[in-house]
Image: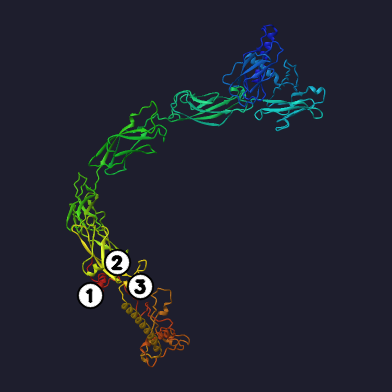
């Protein structure tokens, strides 16, 4: 693009020059001022600090005056030759900039002005390229690549009338443009740096800055003698777009000869990068039924090349659309922004739910011949709107429900909706619009199938309604889209039949309360507590029974439900709560299946004065000497209720006379009184004080209560002392002495008994036994604690148990072999000798000693050897018990068992001759 602009500018300039030479134009008369009143220049979006932008041309007809230029925008300045440059760097110039440039001659009040407008490249409204802008562009191009760059010199001008001297401004070196991706050869010479003093002294040149002696170092170098500056390698604008170097000139001794000059090197962009999409797949959506021009989505591609040139200007287009329904080009894309919009109507999610769009991005402003391209996929989902009303599958539904049942699904209402499943546009909402004024039914939506579940929420009565005719309307959670009408199939009828079931009897008043005074005698009829059978169309008999009667006071007539007392009704019973006694009764019919209902009878018992008051406490204590605080607080209590309770009356009886002389009672309040001593001193002891207390009932009841009062000596704190407590128990000094004598006598008797037991022990050892030696039974004590094994119950050698045929083998056996039942031949044990004079107390000791000797005597029978038992097997003379057969069907008679009494009746029934069942 830049090259083309330069060629165009050169062509126009050449044409203008040739026309001038041919005399085609006539120079107008000279007039001081700017050559034009408005300058418009297209500039790149990135402007570096010090970069020349344009040159304003001022015509000075006298050529003798010094003209100064001033910019109204501090971001831009104007040199003495009219060159406008940037005072700061602009990273992204996106909007046009406009400012004023003022020219004024020294000592001349006249001011000239012109307007400068800078338009960034690629602006949506590019300005026309005028002849002046072409000249300025040509001037920039011609000045951009100077072959020789000299160090500026400072000159002194003649002074003016006021003696002021003005120094001429330094000129700025135009930037050096280097194309990226150059193929060389390298190093490639860019410019030559020289000083005007190189003829007088030897000069050495050098450059510094990023790209020379700073990273990335080595890209640029300079010949120190000739001043030729080279680039050593290909450049990449996408890595670094510009370089800022400084050129230095020193003499052979290293002394600075010239002031350093700034060198700006710009890397010229080449189209070496394809546009890149941010995503390979874009997802967008648009509602079905959208109008043409509706926004769908935006795709974005970026190009690493210079966005201010055609290399980085990306354009978009749609390559393909799938499917081609209803037309192949349902969408279009904004070539510059990448916005995809609809261009035709007819989007229908129920027909096409998604479109696939292939989008191409091309740089060089979309030039397919020179630009680089890339593609991405855009998936456009068609979102659902509620453009399909729900429709019931049939016009009439039916169902049936048992009476008195709730939460039962009567019928399932099926519906069809073509909108997006499980969305508000698809979810059905059912309403009952007629046929259910009492609200017996409701319709809940099945979230999975979208069916309407007609459910009973309030029990129905067959005797009241045998059938229901409902009208049901179905709609969606979301409102229908604009212009969509409800379908006639959104309404249907539902017929519900009610099934009769056997209902339990119902007590009309439940609970039922009646009032009676307590004390109602047994056999009194209280009320008739009857129930009614709701099944009017079936005649059934109702019977009654008692279900709960805590005190067992009541009974109910099984036929008519009459309640009668069986005991006295007492309001003060523990089963009466808040004066109310509750009993529960059961009423049941004879239907199939049988049904029953319960009823509660509440009996409110009015209080009568049938309980006399009682006094608490029953025991108390008081000091024997009257004190101000020696009082006993008494409280009266009555099980009855108001007005048969307090205030209570308290009175001491008049007999015996000492009672009122020693004590006095005073009522403190309606329920409380105080009992205290009337005399200053009373002997310690226990006194039973009778007090008569009466209530306020009608008739009045009185009760005479005894209070056990302990009178005792007290300490200073008014508490009974230990001795006082004993004395208060009613024991005098004589009684205490008698108790002590009894204790001493008891201890003496225990001591004498112990001494007697000791003497008895000694006499028992010295006195003989009363038993005659001939009557000694020690040798006759035998132990029978062994039992023979059962028949064939162990793996023993049973031949040892068989009865031998003869005893010859035992008689003739060798020495050392005993008979199995003979006494061992060893010395006999010594038994204790009986005393000649036996004593009765020694009998027990003699028996125990004999037992110990017999237990330790191996010669005493039974011997520690095998014993011979009759063998109950083959060849046994005793026979075998196995021959008994309990199931024998012989003629054995067991009738004698009937004569043995009731304890053998069971055996007589089993084995006797009784009658069979």
> In terms of sequence position, does the residue under pointer 2 or pointer 1 come before the other?
2
Q: Position of residue 413 (x, y in %)?
A: 33, 36
Q: Nearer the viewer, mark 2 or mark 1?
A: 2
Q: Quadrant of the C terminus?
A: bottom left
* Residue 6 shows up from this direction: no
Q: CA distance from mark 3 to mark 1?
A: 77 Å
- Give how far apart the Cα atoms at labels 3 and 2 are: 19 Å
Q: Is residue 315 above or below residue 8?
A: below
Q: Nearer the viewer, mark 3 or mark 2?
A: 3
Q: Residues within 10 Å of mark 1 (few under 14, many from 20)?
A: few
Q: Nearer the viewer, residue 781 or 456?
A: 456
* Label 3 packing within 10 angstroms: few (<14), some (14-19), many (20+): few
Q: Secondary structure at mark 2?
A: strand
For residue 769, the mark is none
Instruction: Judge whether 500 appears above or below 143 on screen.
Output: below
Label 3 belongs to which residue? 723
Which label was assigned to residue 899? 1
The answer to whether residue 160 is visible is yes
Q: Is tag 3's residue or tag 1's residue first in the polypeptide sequence? A: 3
Q: Residue at x 73, y 18 (%)?
A: 164
Q: In the rendered image, which quarter contains the N terminus?
A: top right
């Amino acid at each position: 693009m830049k090259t083309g602009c330069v060629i165009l500018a050169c062509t126009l300039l050449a044409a203008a020059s040739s026309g001038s030479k041919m005399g085609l134009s006539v120079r107008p008369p000279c007039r001081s001022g700017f050559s034009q009143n408005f300058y418009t220049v297209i500039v790149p979006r990135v402007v570096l600090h010090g970069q020349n932008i344009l040159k304003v041309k001022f015509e000075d007809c006298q050529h003798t005056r010094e003209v100064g230029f001033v910019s109204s925008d501090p971001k831009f300045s104007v040199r003495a030759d009219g060159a406008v440059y940037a005072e700061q760097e602009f990273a992204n110039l996106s909007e046009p900039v406009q400012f004023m440039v003022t020219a004024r001659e020294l000592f001349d009040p006249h001011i000239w002005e012109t307007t400068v407008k800078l338009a960034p490249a690629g602006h949506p409204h590019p300005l026309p390229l005028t002849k002046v802008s072409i000249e300025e562009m040509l001037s920039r191009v011609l000045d951009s690549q100077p072959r020789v760059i000299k160090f500026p010199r400072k000159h002194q001008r003649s002074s003016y009338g006021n003696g002021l001297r003005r120094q001429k401004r330094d000129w700025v070196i135009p930037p050096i443009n280097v194309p990226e991706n150059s193929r060389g050869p390298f190093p490639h010479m860019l410019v030559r740096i020289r000083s005007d003093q190189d003829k007088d002294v030897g000069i050495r040149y050098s450059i510094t800055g990023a790209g020379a002696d700073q990273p990335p170092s080595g890209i640029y170098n300079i010949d120190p003698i000739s001043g030729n500056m080279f680039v050593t390698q290909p450049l990449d604008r996408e890595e670094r777009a510009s370089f800022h170097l400084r050129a230095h000139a020193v003499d052979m001794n290293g002394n600075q000869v010239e002031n350093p000059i700034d060198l700006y090197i710009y890397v010229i962009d080449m189209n070496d990068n394809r546009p890149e999409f941010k995503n390979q797949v874009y997802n967008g959506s648009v509602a079905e039924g959208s109008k043409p021009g509706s926004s769908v989505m935006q795709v974005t591609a970026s190009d690493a090349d210079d966005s201010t040139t055609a290399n980085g200007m990306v354009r978009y287009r749609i390559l393909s659309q799938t499917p081609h329904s209803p037309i192949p080009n349902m969408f279009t894309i904004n070539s510059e922004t990448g916005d995809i919009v609809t261009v035709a109507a007819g989007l229908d999610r129920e027909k096409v739910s998604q479109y696939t769009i292939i989008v191409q991005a091309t740089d060089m402003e979309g030039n397919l011949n020179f630009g680089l391209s890339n593609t991405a996929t855009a998936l456009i989902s068609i979102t659902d709107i509620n453009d399909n009303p729900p429709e019931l599958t049939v016009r009439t539904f039916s169902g049936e429900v048992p009476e008195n049942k709730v939460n039962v699904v009567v019928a399932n209402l099926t519906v069809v909706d073509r909108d997006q499943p499980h969305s508000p546009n698809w979810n059905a909402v059912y309403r009952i619009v007629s046929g259910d004024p009492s609200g017996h039914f409701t319709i809940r939506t099945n979230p999975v199938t979208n069916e309407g579940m007609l459910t009973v929420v309030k029990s129905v009565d067959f005797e009241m309604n045998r059938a229901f005719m409902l009208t049901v309307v179905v709609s969606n959670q979301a409102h229908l889209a604009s212009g969509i009408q409800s379908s006639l199939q959104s309404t249907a009828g539902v017929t519900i039949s009610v099934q009769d079931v056997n209902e339990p009897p119902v007590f009309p008043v439940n609970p039922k309360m009646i009032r009676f005074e307590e004390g109602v005698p047994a056999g009194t009829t209280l009320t008739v507590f009857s129930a009614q059978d709701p099944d009017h169309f079936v005649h059934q008999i109702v019977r009654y029974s008692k279900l709960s009667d805590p005190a067992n006071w009541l009974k109910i007539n099984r036929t008519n439900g009459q309640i009668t007392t069986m005991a006295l009704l007492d309001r003060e019973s523990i089963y009466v709560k808040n004066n109310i006694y509750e009993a529960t009764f059961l009423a049941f019919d004879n239907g199939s299946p049988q049904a029953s209902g319960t009823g509660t009878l509440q009996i409110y018992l009015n209080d009568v004065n049938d309980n006399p008051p009682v006094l608490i406490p029953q025991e108390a204590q008081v000091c024997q000497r009257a004190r101000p605080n020696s009082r006993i607080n008494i409280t009266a209590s009555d099980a009855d209720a108001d007005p048969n309770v307090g205030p209570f009356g308290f009175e001491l009886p008049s007999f015996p006379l000492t009672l009122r002389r020693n004590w006095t009672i005073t009522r403190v309040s309606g329920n409380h009184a105080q009992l205290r001593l009337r005399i200053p001193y009373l002997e310690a002891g226990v006194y039973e004080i009778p007090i008569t207390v009466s209530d306020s009932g009608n008739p009045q009841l009185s009760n005479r209560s005894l209070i056990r009062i302990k009178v005792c000596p007290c300490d200073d704190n008014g508490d009974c002392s230990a001795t006082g407590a004993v004395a208060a128990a009613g024991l005098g000094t004589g009684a205490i002495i008698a108790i002590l004598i009894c204790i001493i006598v008891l201890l003496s008797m225990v001591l004498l008994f112990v001494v007697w037991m000791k003497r008895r022990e000694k006499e028992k050892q010295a006195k003989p036994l009363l038993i005659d030696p001939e009557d000694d039974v020690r040798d006759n004590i035998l132990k029978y604690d062994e039992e023979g094994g059962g028949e064939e119950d162990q793996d023993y050698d049973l031949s040892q148990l068989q009865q031998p045929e003869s005893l010859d083998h035992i008689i003739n056996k060798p020495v050392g072999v005993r008979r199995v039942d003979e006494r061992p031949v060893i010395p006999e044990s010594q038994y204790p000798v009986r005393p000649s004079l036996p004593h009765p107390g020694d009998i027990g000791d003699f028996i125990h000693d004999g037992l110990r000797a017999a237990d330790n005597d191996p010669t005493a029978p039974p011997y520690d050897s095998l014993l011979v038992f009759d063998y109950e097997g083959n060849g046994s003379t005793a026979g075998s018990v196995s021959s008994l057969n309990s199931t024998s069907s012989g003629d054995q008679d067991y009738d004698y068992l009937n004569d043995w009494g009731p304890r053998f009746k069971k055996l007589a029934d089993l084995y006797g001759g009784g009658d069979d069942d």
